[in-house]
Amino acid sequence: MDTNALPLLDRGVLQKLRDGLDDEDVCKHFVLNFIALLPDRAEKVRLTLTTGDLRGALDAVLSLKSSSQMVGAERLAEFATDLEHCLRVDTRHAEPARLLPQLAAANISRITKCGRQTTDLLQKYVA
């Protein structure tokens, strides 16, 4: 799948979140928390990959993926899903201490860029 073809943000997911919470302020607070925590989540992915910490990388990627899915950040969630797949499959055939820094080099800039773009859209959504 061409990850870049996915929308940055699925507003339908945000609408379902808003409807499910039945309180616009709670939804807004949830989205603002996602925005506030996103840089730390991306940094944890970067740090665990560059240090070859497979367990930490899986935890960081799963956190990024699930939180992104919850706010409708489809492209960011798919980047995390692709990275999770690499962590689970490719590390069976390669030493994590060598592979993970390569995965960092191949993925961190696009995750960071997508995170910034998604944040910009989400800020407009909650404004």
Image (tube, helix red, strand yellow):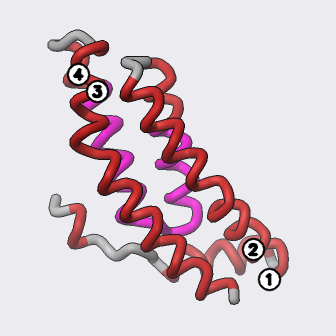
The reply to whether callout 4 and callout 3 are in contact (CB within 8 Å) is yes
Q: How far apart are marks 4 and 1 (CA)?
A: 43 Å
Left/right of residue 82 with respect to residue 41 in the rendered view: left
The reply to whether callout 3 and callout 1 are in contact (CB within 8 Å) is no
Which numbered disc covers residue 24?
1
Q: Distance between the residues labelled 3 and 2?
A: 36 Å
Residue 97's place in the image compared with 61, above or below, is above
Q: Viewer-proximal residue, 115 or 71?
A: 115
> What kind of element bears circle 3?
helix
Residue 14's place in the image compared with 102, above or below, is below
> What kind of element bears circle 1?
helix
Picture coordinates of residue 124 (x, y %)?
A: 59, 87
Q: Give the range drawn in magenta.
A: 61-88
Mark with earlier residue (2, 4): 2
Picture coordinates of residue 82 (x, y %)?
A: 28, 44
Q: For residue 94: magenta?
A: no
Residue corresponding to mark 3 = 101
Left/right of residue 23 with respect to residue 127 in the rendered view: right
The reply to whether callout 2 and callout 1 are in contact (CB within 8 Å) is yes
Which numbered disc covers residue 27?
2
Q: Nearer the viewer, mark 3 or mark 1?
A: 3
Which numbered disc covers residue 99?
4
Q: Nearer the viewer, mark 2 or mark 4?
A: 4
Q: Which amino acid does label 1 sit on?
A: Glu
Mark with earlier residue (4, 1): 1
